[in-house]
Image (spheres, helix red, strand yellow):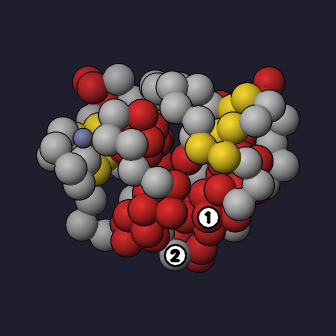
C-alpha cells in the first residue's frame, strides 16, 4: 500500500493526534498509516522504515515553511507544527511518493537525503 493511501485509510480509523504517533483514541498522520497496515505500536517505527524506506532516505521541503528534512519528518512536522489534516498530508505525500513499482527508490527530482544530516532518524 502506498504511504498516502495508508494515511488516508488510517485517518478514517482514529481521530487526529498531535506530538504522538499512536494512542488509544488518536493517531498522527504517520501513526494513521501504520494503523492502516496493521503495524503493532511497539514495532511502529521499524514497520514504517521497512514499508516505506524511501520516506526515510529522501528529503523534501516542507510545503508551508520550506525547511528541508526527510519525508517522514516532514509528515510529522506538518501534523504537529502546522496542524495540517491527515487528508491534506496524504495529498502532499501522493505528489512526491514513488509509484509502487519503484518502492524503495528515490522519486524523480528529489535528491537522496545526505548522510551528514542524520539519515534514518524519525521524529515521533
Ligand atoms: Zn514547516
Where ligand 1 lies, by quadrant? Answer: top left
Pointer 2 and pointer 1: residues touching (CB < 8 Å)?
no
Q: Is residue 66 left or right of residue 24?
A: left
Look at the numbered disc 2 and give the secondary structure of its residue.
loop
Q: Is residue 62 left or right of residue 106?
A: left
- Alpha carbons under labels 2 and 1: distance apart: 17 Å
Q: Is residue 60 left or right of residue 13?
A: left
Q: Residue at x 42, y 62 (%)?
A: 88
Whether residue 63 can be seen here: yes
Q: Quadrant of the N terminus?
A: bottom right
Query: Residue 79: x percent and y percent?
Result: 44, 42
Query: Residue 22: x percent and y percent?
Result: 69, 32
Give the labeled residue for mark 1.
8
Instruction: Indicate whether 20 appears above or below 106.
Output: above
Give the labeled residue for mark 2.
99
Q: Quick one: 86 or 15, which is closer to the camera?
A: 15
Whether residue 105 can be seen here: no
Query: Residue 39: x percent and y percent?
Result: 80, 42
Instruction: Name the N-terminal-most of marks 2 and 1.
Output: 1
Q: Mark 2 against mark 1, which lies toward the viewer?
A: 1
Q: Residue at x 50, y 63 (%)?
A: 87
Look at the numbered disc 1 and give the secondary structure of its residue.
helix
Q: Residue at x 71, y 60 (%)?
A: 12
Query: Residue 84: x percent and y percent?
Result: 39, 50
Q: Which mark is residue 16?
A: none
The tally of labels here is: 2
Q: Residue at x 31, y 46 (%)?
A: 59
Q: Quick one: 44 or 84, which is closer to the camera?
A: 84
Amino acid at each position: 500500500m502506498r504511504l498516502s493511501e495508508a494515511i488516508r485509510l488510517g485517518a478514517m480509523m482514529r481521530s487526529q493526534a498531535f506530538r504522538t504517533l499512536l494512542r488509544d483514541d488518536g493517531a498522527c498522520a504517520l501513526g494513521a498509516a501504520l494503523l492502516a497496515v496493521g503495524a503493532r505500536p511497539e514495532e511502529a517505527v521499524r514497520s514504517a522504515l521497512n514499508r516505506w524506506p524511501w520516506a526515510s532516505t529522501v528529503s523534501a521541503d516542507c510545503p508551508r515553511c520550506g525547511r528541508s528534512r526527510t519525508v517522514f519528518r516532514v509528515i510529522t512536522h506538518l501534523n504537529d507544527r502546522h496542524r495540517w489534516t491527515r487528508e491534506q498530508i496524504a495529498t502532499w505525500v501522493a505528489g512526491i511518493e514513488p509509484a509502487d513499482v519503484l518502492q524503495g527508490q528515490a522519486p524523480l527530482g528529489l535528491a537522496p537525503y545526505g548522510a551528514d544530516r542524520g539519515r534514518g532518524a524519525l521524529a515521533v
